[in-house]
């Protein structure tokens, strides 16, 4: 049986690309580099617009469901 304490996770972009698409990594970097929350529109504006706004919103919702981010819903 292997010793789990010797396992390490590579958090470089290359290793993260095994789990996330480049545009998803761009979203995470954008969210976690700021000091305030961003709306889904601001996130979409902050990454390349090759992704639909719906894809961005769905990814943000997935991140919320996994407790990686929190959200505050407003109307308007």
Image (cartoon, rainbow, N blue to C red):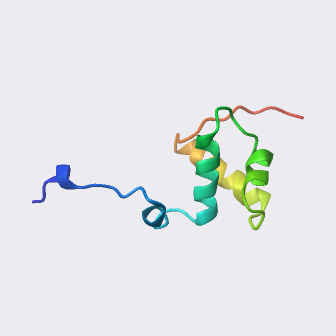
The foreground one among 33 and 1 is 33
The foreground one among 40 and 47 is 47
Specify the farthest residue to the left.
Answer: 1
The foreground one among 58 and 3 is 3
The foreground one among 55 and 31 is 31
Question: How many tags in the picture?
Answer: 0
For residue 9, what is the image quadrant?
Answer: bottom left
Q: Position of residue 7 (x, y in %)?
A: 23, 55
Q: Residue at x 28, y 55 (%)?
A: 8
Eyeballing the image, is 36 above or below 50?
above
Residue 16 relative to residue 5: left or right: right
Q: Residue at x 12, y 59 (%)?
A: 2
Quadrant containing the N terminus is: bottom left
Eyeballing the image, is 23 above or below 65?
below
Q: Position of residue 49 (x, y in %)?
A: 78, 63
Q: Residue at x 66, y 35 (%)?
A: 71
Residue 1 relative to residue 6: left or right: left
For residue 37, what is the image quadrant?
Answer: top right
Q: Position of residue 76 (x, y in %)?
A: 90, 35
Q: Residue at x 71, y 55 (%)?
A: 56
Q: Position of residue 46 (x, y in %)?
A: 74, 52
Specify the farthest residue to the right.
Answer: 76
């Amino acid at each position: 049986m292997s010793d789990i304490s010797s396992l390490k996770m590579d958090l470089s972009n290359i290793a993260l690309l095994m789990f996330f698409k480049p545009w998803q990594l761009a979203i995470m970097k954008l969210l976690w580099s700021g000091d305030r929350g961003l709306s889904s529109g601001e996130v979409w504006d902050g990454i390349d617009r090759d992704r639909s706004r719906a894809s961005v919103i769905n990814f943000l919702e997935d991140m919320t469901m996994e407790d990686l981010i929190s959200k505050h819903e407003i109307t308007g």
